[in-house]
Amino acid sequence: MRVIGRSFETAMRNEFRMQSRRRAMWLTMLGVSTLFPLLALHALDERFAQEGTLRAIADWTNFLNLWVPIAYGIVLADRIPRDRRLRMDELFATFPTNQRYRLWGKALGVALATVVPLLLVALAGAVHISLRLHSAEVMKFEVVAICVILLPALLFMTAVCLLLSTFVWPPAIGFICAGLWLFLQVSPTMLPSLANSLMSPTGSYAIAGLFHSDRGWAGTQGLVPLGPLGPAVSAQSGVLGPVLVTVLAAVLLGALPAAAGRRNPV
Amino acid sequence: MRIHIHELTKTFPGGIQALRGINLDIESGMFGLLGPNGAGKTTLMRILAGVFLPSGGTVRIDTWDLAVDRDRTAVKCVLGYLPQELGLYPDLRAREFLDYIAVLKGMDHTPSRRRRVAELLDTVGLAGDAQRKLGTFSGGMKQRIGIAQALLNDPRLLIVDEPTAGLDPEERIRFRNLLSDLAGDRTVLLSTHIVEDIAQTCRNLAIMSTGAVVFRGTAADLIDAARDHVWLISTPGPKPEGNLTVVSTLNLGSSVQYRVVGEVSPQVQGQGVPTEPSLEDGYVWVMRSYRDAVSSAVA
């Protein structure tokens, strides 16, 4: 049991280290997450001033959440194929310890490292809003918004992209990530999707239920109920949505060792 | 450790037969596995390391049977493996990498693990580079880190696959010496297509070709196999004809000296001087004989 914990912890620590030392990761994540907010700074400022503190924070976090998970997924996508390319997977296959804990540690390590630049940008945005709105509560709300909007979305993308990378050609993963994330933001009245449902990783229920904003809602239909997956908006469903997305991501990550092992030549 | 391989076969999806009924007994000490690219050496190494499962036949390492899951795990506990062209993680420092691998090998006692990492960095001559990122290492330094990771668990069985490919001559010699020093009472299995590596390090060896073992014996046996079949032919004219394999060509200005292996034809025998065979000549002779035997069997 101790060895299992050690494998998980050491894989997480070293993958975090490696991902943190990638200049390309910092450039991509900081570039993508700051470019659009800076371009739209004036318009955003006006909107935030009209919305008030709580909605402004949801709006800002949702603004990041609109496209940043795509770049995040792309940055993560080469981590598992890289082990194959470097022949590290062949080496790992000769070790007596179970490799599934290493893989889960790896997933968490790269995810945490890639989240850091996004958190910095999200918090920097919150500081800006706090100064504009003269509200000290902004930082507290931003932490909640990160936990219920941004992190479940990123965890979902971690699971999807790492799982895809076990059987899809890595450069194609970028297109799949982009397609999937945009598809999840298309109104379900146009295309059947998880958008506007409790399972939607775009955070619509958290934004509506906890921040009283419809910014996260896909399409122009307002708060469209979708049967059992789209209950009424409330504080409870605002919490339940992110929890379900986290569970969905955990289930997908649970399948990661089996998917990666499928490529193992044994 | 004693390795007993009996009628070992490996067929990959698509019907590619990489190993065809290998029989081999390997005792403690350095053992060389020679053969051209595509001979099946890497497949055999991977089976012994537990990366591949055999399609047929048996492999026993001491009392462990590699077909049994539990036995395979037991072998992995005493195994050190250096795969061909191991890339390493370029963003990790040498010490961090070895520590990572040590944990994954099951060494969970931190002080003794750190001691072992420091000791091995010293053994492979990289103690001064412990804090450098692996991405900045030369090919030879990477191979030395590769061998250090293989030795972390003080393995009784060490498998190294083509470790000197791509190294400059000095690094190759250094790496060969390192392997010889490490052998001790371990079983070290060295796979290569560079005859010189085997000549300098292994007393016992096998030659593989097209998934089969075509020679098994000592280095002296291999040299003996080519006795009376190696000639030096000096000629001002073109390359000697006949069923010969030219091992080396030396331009002497007015003439060219060819070192040839084969059943020298009477026509060139007058110009040819028999010479003492080397291990390389033995290798060429065995491979020639095997190819001839296969050709005549097919015909």
Image (cartoon, grey):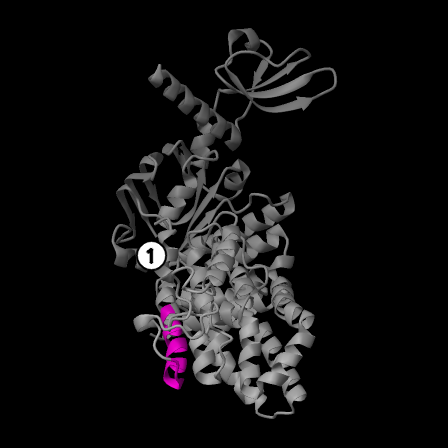
Prevailing SS of the magenta stretch:
helix
Q: How far across and down, in percent of the image, does residue A144 sit?
A: 49, 84
Res A164 visible? yes
Quadrant of the image occupied by residue A246? bottom left
User: Would you say A106 lies left or right of B49 here?
Assistant: right
Res B119 visible? no
**Mark 1: amino acid:** Val
**At numbered mark 1, what does the secondary structure look like: helix, strand or loop?**
helix
Pointer 1 residue:
B75
Per the image, is A51 magenta? no
Q: Residues within 10 Å of mark 1 (few under 14, many from 20)?
A: many
Image quarter of the N terminus of chain A = bottom left
Q: Given the current orientation, which residue lies at the most extreme right position?
A: B253
User: Would you say B228 lies left or right of B74 here?
Assistant: right
Chain letter of the residue beneath label 1 in the structure image? B
Q: How far across and down, in percent of the image, does residue B229 sit?
A: 49, 20
Q: How far across and down, in percent of the image, does residue B88 sit?
A: 54, 57
Query: Viewer-proximal residue, B105 or A103?
Result: A103
Q: How far across and down, in percent of the image, does residue B285 sit?
A: 47, 24
Query: Viewer-proximal residue, A23 or B86?
Result: A23
Query: Viewer-proximal residue, A33 or A101?
Result: A33
